[in-house]
Amino acid sequence: MAHPEAGASVDETHPGGPPSRGLLPLLFTGNMAMYALYVGVGSVLLPLQIEHIDAAHKVANLGLVGGIAAVFATVFNPVAGALSDRSGRRNPWILGGGLAAVAAMGLLGGVRTVALVAIGWCLGQAVMNIYQAALTSVVPDRIPLTRRGTASAAVGLGLPVGSTIGVVLASAFSDHYSIGYLALGVLVAAAAVLFTSCAREQPQPPKRSASLRDQAAAFLSVLREHDFRWAFTGRALLVLGYFAVTGYQLYILQDHITLPGGLSPSHAVAVLTPIAGVAMAISTVLGGVLSDRLNRRKIFVACSAALSAGALLIPVLTPTWPGMIVFAAVNGLAFGCFMAVDTALVTLVLPKAEDAARDLGILNIANAAPQIVGPFVASAVVTLGGYPPLFLFGGLLAVLGALAVLPIRTVR
């Protein structure tokens, strides 16, 4: 059965029947495992592995590997979303991507050159974005409009909890990072098996095959939609600012912050991440639920982006360990609220519900594309001016991200 258009007033109930019992906890678990891998690898294992291979050029090499791998994320997310739209199924793609993550992480943990690390992380990004594209589409597929904020909060909680689990797990294996990679891959595979075993799915009629030219035109056409384009721009700017800084967190703690005696940089990351995670969890729940009750999205998104900009000034003004703790808490509050409410906002500006996975795949370019540009720009900024300009750069982008949601017309 075809979905009515997203945001239409007639769509006040779930278009395909009531969602499976326990769907929100399953969405939380699936996203938690995904973010555990992304953050555990990106914040701890990958920087440690690259530093072990070539410590003298670690900043440039991390930027190069991260940027190249993000190209794969950008390509695979919308393609995988379109394929799952065409097949009328989400679960097989979630399961396939999750199981493939074990092999990709096993390969990545076993390589010993920067070039092979880049190849391994490219494969990891590819399979994880197949998983992510299908999992992201479950919300517009199976959740009523009136519960989008609550569902987005459940999804958003996966980020702080997953980040904490991923970093703690990765830090525990900082001396044996190949085991850490494999453990994170197994976590994603287990979540994929759990989700696809427990979340019932009503297959939709498969779509007629379209030519590559038609698919490319469809990908570009959604960006011509006024509100979707502004939502895309705001997400891209904030994500670029956020990950430009957090991607170098381990090196910031090594080279910019004086840590207390006996605290290693990898264990300092493991301390900061739960602090940010708790703050993120609180703001994710409050932001998602309050945005539903007040039926307001833009003010939450704009204010949280502005708060993120303020947080990024803290390590510039107080480049100390206590300053980093405050930064982690404030930035966690800002980013948690932003991701929860912005996810709900985005599902309300999708042009057509039947193309939800494809269009969300396009939006996820706003998550992935900044990670292409971000590592190159961040490494250049750090090389030329050190870490304080990097925080200022991230703060500027967050302010621009806050301003970008204001022109959206169809969502309050």
Image (tube, rainbow, N blue to C red):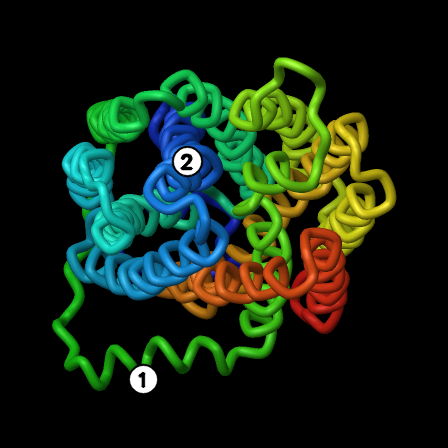
- Under mark 2, the amino acid is Leu
User: Is 272 situated left or right of 302 in this image?
Assistant: left
Q: Earlier in the sequence, mark 2 or mark 1?
A: 2
- Residue wearing tag 2: 48
- Residue wearing tag 1: 217
Q: Is residue 335 above or below residue 209?
A: above
User: Is 135 situated left or right of 185 in this image?
Assistant: right
Q: Nearer the viewer, residue 84 or 42?
A: 42
**Residue 104 numbered tag:** none
**Secondary structure under the numbered disc 1 in the rendered image:** helix
Q: Nearer the viewer, residue 22 or 98?
A: 98
Residue in the image at 73% along x and 59% along y: 389
Q: Residues within 10 Å of mark 2 (few under 14, many from 20)?
A: many
Residue in the image at 85% along x and 39% along y: 318
Residue in the image at 55% along x and 37% along y: 250
- Under mark 1, the amino acid is Ala
